[in-house]
């Protein structure tokens, strides 16, 4: 195995470990936030219980004051009854005294209910305080563990960053740029070859390409653009018969399904548009040109897509690929990598066949 590839293998291991450590470090604030939200919920329960106790105490004081005021009124009415001269005046004062005594009994009943509830309220407060105390101890322990884990990850991150620089220094500059470019899109810049297949995209290599990889030459996968390498310890040297490529027919506009490319779609930029006809209506799906992720919801219009979405067809570049709607539904929110690579391969051919089409060059590895 050539030194550049050996160093790239080590670099990819380092890059993956650095990515893992960065993800762990980035996850700490979220983890602490979840812990604090849990604690905030327990504090809210305690505050609610305390507020209920205070509300009951305020209500009890209000009724106590009302009883005292009513008792003073009764005393005043009794004093007045001694000085009245007519029977009607006396009866009126007695009625006032009866009403006041009824109000006193009602307030005393409410005070009694509040006294009964006070014991239950106090139990709720004590239980909430005990739960908060226990949870605070557990949460502080979790926070300490999270901080310790993060400190360890940051130390390892610094160590791995040093290893990364060493691994980068041992790789040819052009090959390194290609590796990092593909790494950005694929998540890996290298792929092992086993059983005559690229393990990155699972595409079978041509015999000549496979032999070049086995002879320790620097080879780029034609499908996924990863740098290929062969490990005799794990690779299986299987010779496969050559496959004759089928001649691909030129695309037609009047079909039931078609792919189009646009370099300046809305604010997204490069996209692939999938059109299909079925059950008397046309559908349009939009996919990001770099990641293959679906953008927005599927749009449906009545009639044929060539008429329903005529503006897209006029400004887009038609590709040779065609996939039925059932597969598009199964893929849901993201195109398989093999399909995305095929679309970029078709785009490269379509640009060659349509030199008058004006668009920016795609940054996707398969379009290079």
Image (cartoon, rainbow, N blue to C red):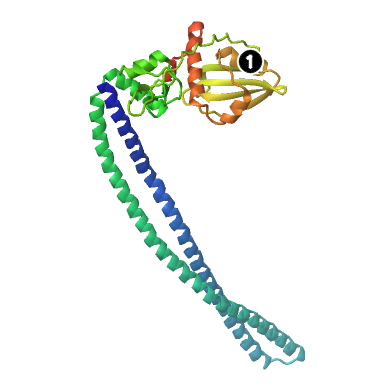
* Residue 81 place in picture, x, y as percent: 68, 91
**Element at label 1:** helix
* Residue 108 place in picture, x, y as percent: 61, 81
Instruction: Give the labeled residue for mark 1.
Output: 310
* Residue 289 place in picture, x, y as percent: 49, 22
Quadrant containing the C terminus in the rendered view: top left
Quadrant containing the N terminus in the rendered view: top left
* Front-most of residues 351 and 118: 351
* Front-most of residues 211 and 315: 211
Q: Quadrant of residue 21?
A: top left
Residue drawn at x 56%, y 20% is 273
* Front-most of residues 111 and 298: 298
Badge 1: how crowded within 10 Å, few (<14), some, or many (20+)?
A: few
Residue drawn at x 35%, y 15% is 212
Residue drawn at x 59%, y 10% is 251
One can see residue 269 in this view: no
One can see residue 155 in this view: yes
How many numbered tags mark residues here? 1
* Front-most of residues 120 and 349: 349
Left or right position of 260 against 46: right
Q: Quadrant of residue 323?
A: top right
Residue drawn at x 32%, y 54% is 144
Left or right position of 297 against 144: right
* Residue 356 place in picture, x, y as percent: 50, 5
């Amino acid at each position: 195995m050539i030194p550049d590839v050996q160093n790239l293998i080590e670099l990819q291991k380092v890059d993956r470990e650095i990515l893992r450590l960065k993800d762990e470090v980035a996850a700490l604030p979220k983890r602490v936030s979840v812990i604090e939200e849990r604690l905030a919920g327990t504090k809210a329960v305690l505050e609610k219980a305390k507020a209920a106790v205070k509300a009951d105490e305020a209500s009890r004081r209000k009724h106590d004051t009302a009883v005292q005021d009513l008792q003073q009124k009764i005393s005043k009415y009794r004093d007045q009854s001694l000085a009245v001269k007519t029977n009607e005046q006396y009866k009126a004062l007695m009625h006032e005294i009866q009403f006041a005594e009824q109000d006193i009994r009602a307030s005393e009943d409410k005070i009694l209910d509040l006294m009964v509830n006070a014991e239950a309220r106090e139990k709720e407060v004590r239980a909430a305080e005990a739960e908060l105390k226990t949870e605070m101890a557990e949460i502080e322990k979790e926070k300490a563990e999270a901080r310790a884990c993060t400190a360890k990850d940051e130390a390892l991150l610094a160590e791995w960053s040093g290893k990364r620089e060493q691994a980068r220094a041992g790789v040819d500059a052009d090959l390194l740029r290609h590796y990092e470019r593909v790494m950005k899109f694929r998540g890996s810049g290298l792929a092992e070859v086993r059983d005559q297949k690229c393990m990155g995209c699972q595409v079978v290599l041509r015999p000549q390409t496979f032999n070049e990889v086995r002879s320790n030459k620097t080879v780029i996968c034609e499908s996924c653009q990863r740098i290929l390498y062969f490990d005799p310890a794990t690779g299986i040297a299987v010779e496969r018969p050559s496959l004759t490529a089928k001649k691909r027919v030129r695309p037609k506009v009047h079909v039931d399904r078609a792919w189009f490319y646009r370099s300046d779609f809305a604010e997204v930029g490069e996209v692939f548009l999938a059109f299909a006809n079925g059950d008397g209506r046309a559908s349009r799906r939009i996919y990001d040109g770099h990641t293959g992720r679906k953008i927005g919801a599927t749009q449906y219009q009545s009639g044929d897509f060539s008429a329903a979405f005529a503006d897209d067809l006029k400004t887009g570049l038609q590709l040779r690929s065609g996939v039925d709607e059932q597969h598009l539904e199964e893929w849901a929110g993201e195109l398989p990598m093999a399909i995305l690579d095929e679309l970029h391969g078709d785009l490269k051919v379509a640009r060659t066949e349509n030199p008058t089409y004006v668009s920016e060059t795609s940054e996707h590895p398969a379009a290079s």
